[in-house]
Amino acid sequence: EVMQLREFLPKVVNGDLIEMLQKACAAETMKERLGQEQEQLRQECLHLRSRLDAAQSECQKEREEKLVLREQLWESREQLQQQAEFCTGLGAASCTLLWSTSSKEEAVKDILHSSEAIPLPLIVAGQTLESFVKSLDGEAKAEQQDSNSHEQQFVLALAGVVTNVAAVTCGRDYLSSSAHVLLETLMQQLELLKPGVFPKLKVLMLMALYNVSISVKGLKYIREFPGLLSLIWTLLEDGDSEVCLHALRLLQSVLLEEALAGPGLLLDDPLLPLERIRTLATSSRHPALRQTAQETLDDLGSLRTSFLDPHGTSSSDQVHV
């Protein structure tokens, strides 16, 4: 039997069987390892699920808090809007009252004799005008605004206060010497305002500049503004008659300064809108504007004549305006 087993055993237990047994052992080992890994993954999945549940509950809590905060934000925004409207209305009423009061010389003296280096109304006027003009995003937005809104009344009242301050001798002397920033702000905002936009504000600012120009020092300072002439030429193209009228009056002050100080750049300016001034003098339906335009033409003609023929010895070289 031993001899038979020795003879038949190699035929039965061959290399394939041994290889299969080895693979079976390896598969069993792999199965055990995969089971362990699966159990580890299951534990990790349970851990991640618990973290997900915690994150979802926290997210839900934050979402509810966000809704509460959003409601509070809307309430605060509504309250802020109401407060802003109230403050604007109060400011408009106060400044309108101050505008009316500043028409008296004693009131202007009281404003200028405050304890501050620069009176508060003048500081507020400059800052408010600058921010308001920047808020006018083009002509379309300006036309959509209510002309009787508290904001516009507030701005007009501040500009009116500045105009009334400049109408008094002590006021324009103060503006000419100690409020150069405000004067520059007025001219800069006039440059930024497009034709046809808020003509009432333009008129008040032009009136303030004209009142300041009555002072020799004020006229000299205004004349030194780099874009003054181009500003006046642009304002003369405005469709509002009052704007053109006060632009011409400011131009008359500049012409007076030219006549006193000698020939400057005005007469040599190629952009001098003589045709526009002639049109205003002949075709305007505004009597005061027609008269002022004609006076401006006469002043220009006299100025040209005095510079070209100062002794009046010859009239052949006169340039007619």
Image (tube, rainbow, N blue to C red):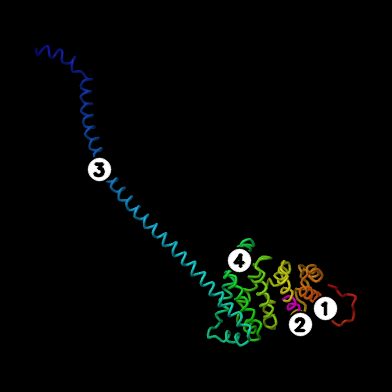
Picture quarter with the C terminus: bottom right
Q: Please report whichever mark, 4 or 1, sits nearer to the chain's N-terminal start.
A: 4
Q: Nearer the viewer, mark 4 or mark 1?
A: 4
Q: Please report whichever mark, 2 or 4, sits nearer to the chain's N-terminal start.
A: 4
Q: Amino acid at mark 4?
A: Asp
Q: Position of residue 161 (x, y in %)?
A: 61, 79
Residue 260 is tagged as 2
Mark 4: few, some, or many residues within 10 Å (few <14, many ≥20)? few
Q: Position of residue 70 (x, y in %)?
A: 42, 59
Cβ–Cβ under 8 Å for marks 2 and 1: no
- Mark 4 lies on residue: 146
Where is 28 relative to 235, above or below? above
**What's the residue at 63%, 70% (across, down)?**
189
Label 2: element kind:
helix
Q: Is residue 273 left or right of residue 54?
A: right
- Mark 3 lies on residue: 43
Give the distance between the C-alpha atoms of the residues marked 2 and 4, in whole angstroms.
Answer: 45 Å
Which one is nearer the viewer's eye here, 281 or 228? 281
Q: Is residue 77 left or right of residue 161?
A: left
Give the residues in magenta: 250-256
Q: Amino acid at mark 1?
A: Ser
Label 1: element kind:
helix
Give the distance between the C-alpha atoms of the residues marked 1 and 3, in whole angstroms.
Answer: 103 Å
Q: Please report whichever mark, 1 or 3, sits nearer to the chain's N-terminal start.
A: 3
Q: Please report whichever mark, 2 or 1, sits nearer to the chain's N-terminal start.
A: 2
Q: Please report whichever mark, 3 or 4, sits nearer to the chain's N-terminal start.
A: 3
**What's the residue at 12%, 14% (across, down)?**
5
**What's the residue at 81%, 74% (across, down)?**
294
Q: Amino acid at mark 2?
A: Leu
Give the distance between the C-alpha atoms of the residues marked 2 and 1, in whole angstroms.
Answer: 13 Å
